[in-house]
Image (tube, rainbow, N blue to C red):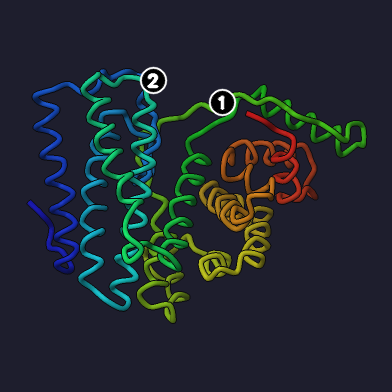
Amino acid sequence: MCSPPPDGVTLAVSLAHEFAHIRLGGLMHLLPITIERAEDNCLYAPWRDDPRPLGGLIQGVYAFVSIAAFWRKHRHSVAGAERRLADFEYAFTRAQAGEGLAITRSAAGLTERGAEFLAILAEEVGSWLDDSPDDSLGGEPVRLARLVASGHRIGWRLRHCRPSEEDVATVVSAWEQREQGERRDPGPLRIGYSITLPDPEMRHWSQGRLGLARRRLQAPQRSRDALNEPWGTTLTDADLELFAGDCEPAAKGFVQQITAVTQADAMANAWAGLGLALGSDPADPAGVALCQRPELVQAVYRRVVEKGENHVSPLELARWIGSAVTG
């Protein structure tokens, strides 16, 4: 059962995807690979906008390994814009599969057979990093794949992870002392883990930047038209600048959005965009904070603004948190 595909490649990807689920379903019928635990129901899946249980995440990992394997071969049979798009899809799905494997292999609830199964998959995906020079990826497709993958991870944390009230209060207090000149060296402030919240509504929010990346590779002259596409309603001019590689004006645009918007999804998109614009510089503590603990930055900023500090700079606050906080 399959809805009519727009083209043969889409059908091929769908077949690779669904047949992987069928194969893994057969294996899981014969051999248990997980011991389901309630605390494992909130894991990050790079291809899903909502948290997932361990068993579902493993199903996704196996499917995306199969999809990446398809793109790995298919990209050598096309040229021009099709080749650029296929290179992007391979880089993107390979990264998704690799991250999903790392998460599942470190999760509680695997049986011995499950751990063995994931180790074999990880060895397979790891071997793809040793492709010959002619097969190596580079340039625009990989840059865009990294942007989309990182943006999804940041956006997911902003929507589903919550730092503790005590941690937020600690950071806010240290920030206020700094602002009052009472404490210039606040750190390091030790902050605990955030909790992950489920999403019963299964909201979808990540298609805009993925669609923009594909548009830039297929028809870059029509990138601005993405703002008017049904899947591009969350995009802004700052996104266009970011995906064009103009990180400095993109960062300024996202900062302006953070100070102006009030809707939760728009705020999360702006914080994620700022993290992506700054994340290219590993020495920038603001980029580090927004890529690793964006939910903490967002929560502290919201609390500071609620207390009347409307003048606070989102960039300055993120940079300070990145320098002051550990954990």
Q: CA distance from mark 1 to mark 2?
A: 14 Å
Q: Which residue is mark 1?
A: 193
Residue 173 on image: x %, y % = 79, 29
Residue 278 on image: x %, y % = 63, 55
Report crowding for label 1: few under 14, some 14 to 19, many 20 or more residues within 10 A (C-alpha).
few
Q: Is residue 138 above or below residue 156?
A: below
Q: Is residue 159 above or below residue 247?
A: above
Q: Is residue 262 left or right of residue 200?
A: right
- Counting residues from the start of the chain, the first of labels 1 and 2 encountered is 2
Residue depicted at 36% across the width and 43% down the height: 98
Q: Quadrant of residue 238?
A: bottom right
Residue 250 on image: x %, y % = 62, 64
SS at mark 2 in the image: helix
Q: Nearer the viewer, residue 300 or 19?
A: 19
Q: Is residue 119 left or right of residue 299?
A: left
Q: Is residue 229 left or right of residue 297?
A: left
Q: Is residue 64 above or below residue 87?
A: above
Residue 48 on image: x %, y % = 35, 44
Query: Mark 2: which amino acid?
Result: Glu
Q: Nearer the viewer, residue 181 or 324?
A: 324
Query: Mark 1: which amino acid?
Result: Tyr
Q: Which residue is mark 2?
A: 39
SS at mark 1 in the image: loop
As drawn, which residue projects farthest toward the bottom? Answer: 221
Residue depicted at 77% across the width and 36% down the height: 307
As drawn, which residue projects farthest toward the right? Answer: 181
